[in-house]
Image: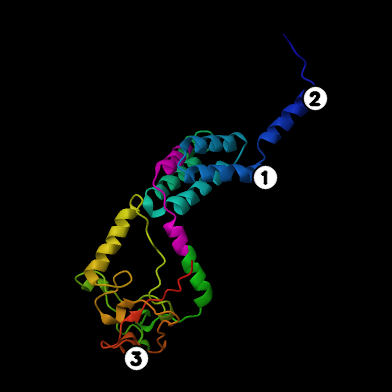
Amino acid sequence: EKRLITLDDIRDALQSRATRYDKHGELHYDAISALHKSVRDSDPDGALYWLGRMLDGGEDALYIARRIVRMAIEDIGMADPQALPQTIAAQQAVHFLGQPEGELALAQAVVYLCQAPKSNAVYRAYGAAQRDVAETRNEPVPLHLRNAPTRLMKGLGYGKGYEYAHDLEAGRSGQAHLPPNLAGRIYYEPTDHGFEAEVRARLAWREQQQGTGARGRGADPRHQTVDLAPGEEPQVVPEDLPPEQAYPPDSPPRPRGRSRKT
């Protein structure tokens, strides 16, 4: 049976399309939020549905690719280091194949992210470091970590006391790498999820090999840590002193501050 298509039919069809997805409006943000939350909660069915909704609505596939790269970094991180190259490969496939062929690459990447173990430890660690940077951005670099390409700089103590890790049996010196007023700060605290459990075990092994202290900062008493008594302030070392003068071998253990940002 033939039916005449009227202007009202066309108007209704256009309105229905706009209602289903508006890639510049609220539904754009709601849909990507739903996709991200589905991935974070390891639900491949929900993730595939919202991916399909966005693509069906005309969403830019490269925008979705960028967002799933971010998901791999933020919600999976070191729990599965292969998540990031998987999403980068999907982005490259979309760029190379275009649409609709490249959409399957996005679907594959989304499913991979859903089944991967999850960790936001790197995300949290970098956020904590950024907060400290905002408060200490003018702190000078410790002398033993400074570059010393000239005789004058060496005479000023630049690089003095630096220990080259590759020359050490353990492959790690235990020397401090933070400004003195951040001594003992720990940003990265790996979970026991996926590969990050191995990372955690490696850090624990190093700590055991090099003695007590935050991240095993060596049997060197300058790098040992102690808990602070209530109201006790961390020891602050003058910036113009090289490490061997700031912390002579007979000095007491360096305190580990408990004022870490959360």
Q: Earlier in the sequence, mark 2 or mark 1?
A: 2
Classify mark 1: residues with Cα within 10 Å, few (<14), some (14-19) or many (20+): few
Residue on which the image places disc 2? 8
How far apart are the alpha carbons under marks 3 and 2? 85 Å
Helix, strand or loop for disc 3: helix
Identify residue type, mark 2: Asp
Question: Is 49 located above or below residue 173 in the figure?
Answer: above
The part of the chain drawn in magenta is 107-126
Residue on which the image places disc 3? 155
Q: Earlier in the sequence, mark 3 or mark 2?
A: 2
Q: Nearer the viewer, residue 123 or 102?
A: 123
Total numbered circles: 3
Kindly report which numbered mark, 3 or 1, lies closer to the viewer in this rendering.
1
Residue on which the image places disc 1? 26
Helix, strand or loop for disc 2: helix
Residue 107 point in image, percent of width and height: 47, 37
Q: Nearer the viewer, residue 251 or 27?
A: 251
Identify residue type, mark 3: Gly
Kindly report which numbered mark, 3 or 2, lies closer to the viewer in this rendering.
2
Q: Residue furthest left?
A: 169
Kindly report which numbered mark, 2 or 1, lies closer to the viewer in this rendering.
1
Residue at 46% across, 60% down: 124
Query: In which quadrant of the rendered view does residue 165 lie?
Result: bottom left
Question: Is 57 located above or below residue 72 in the figure?
Answer: above
Residue 30 point in image, percent of width and height: 62, 44
Identify residue type, mark 1: Glu
How far apart are the alpha carbons under marks 3 and 1? 62 Å
Please indicate whether residue 209 sits to the left or right of residue 185 in the image: left
Residue at 67% across, 45% down: 26
Q: Nearer the viewer, residue 259 or 101?
A: 259
Q: Which mark is residue 258?
A: none
Classify mark 3: residues with Cα within 10 Å, few (<14), some (14-19) or many (20+): few
